[in-house]
Amino acid sequence: MNFFFNSDGRITHKVKLVSVHIPKTAGTSFRNTLKEVYGADQVIRLDINLEDEVIRVNEQLWNEKKLSKEVEVVHGHFSPHLFEKYFRTSPALFITWLRDPVERVISNYYYLEKRLKEELQEEKKGLNILSKMQRSLSEYVTDPLNQNRIAKFLQGRSLDDFAFVGIQEYYADDLQQLGRILSWREVPYYHHNATGKSRTVGDALREEIIRCNQEDVALYEHALSLREKRC
């Protein structure tokens, strides 16, 4: 496997597409599409924790500061700021997908609840930890760590700086349009729902989610206006 570096120690590569995956915005489905279009060997999953900046490549800890020069596409949970901090980006295109902030928060909460249940496997172990430790959706919403996650992933980067901003609610149509923009010969479509069934919450809680995520709401509305212009 070939690796090389530039003079300031950052990684050089031939990455031409950087996909910022904001949690619960059809990321697994989109990653599968990218792998089919570009080839599995040329697409990596990159995750950079926003708080402690721990880096993982394909879900493995990354600490050797090297990247295969065969990689053309990077997709995962990271901010453009952190990607640029550790990687040379030019001339890569940045793209991302957004989702209605209320639905994204609800989906993320129940996804984490599902993962916690899977990890604990309480029924098999005869434990009762989950019922004692579990937070309600309302408690999750009011924790500042969980608020405005879209804005935190973008870290001040304007949506106008992205080559493409898709909307999950229009996923199939936007995926086709992205394929035309990037001159894909085919646009393979996948659907992966890691959360399961949709959830309904009361109006009061929905209003609370909106109140706690004003930055995300503004970004989503801007993304919708960009989509209207694009279409």
Image (cartoon, helix red, strand yellow):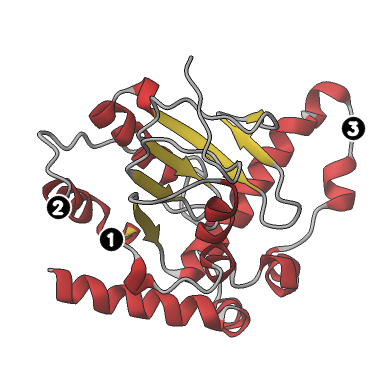
Q: Residue at x 12, y 43 (%)?
A: 183
Q: Position of residue 66 (x, y in %)?
A: 58, 30
Left or right of residue 111, residue 224 in this image: left
Q: Position of residue 22 (x, y in %)?
A: 49, 55
Q: Residue at x 68, y 64 (%)?
A: 137
Q: Is residue 122 above or below residue 124?
A: below
Q: Are marks 3 and 1 in contact (CB under 8 Å)?
A: no
What is the C-alpha distance between the residues marked 3 and 1? 49 Å
Residue under label 2: 181
What is the C-alpha distance between the residues marked 2 and 3? 52 Å
Q: Secondary structure at mark 2?
A: helix
Q: Is residue 87 above or below residue 106?
A: above
Q: Secondary structure at mark 3?
A: loop
Q: Are marks 1 and 2 in contact (CB under 8 Å)?
A: yes
Give the residue type at disc 3: Leu
Q: Nearer the viewer, mark 3 or mark 1?
A: 1
Q: Residue at x 42, y 74 (%)?
A: 158
Q: Nearer the viewer, mark 2 or mark 3?
A: 2
Residue under label 3: 127
Q: Closer to the N terminus: mark 2 or mark 3? A: 3
Q: Are marks 2 and 3 in contact (CB under 8 Å)?
A: no
Q: Closer to the N terminus: mark 1 or mark 2? A: 1
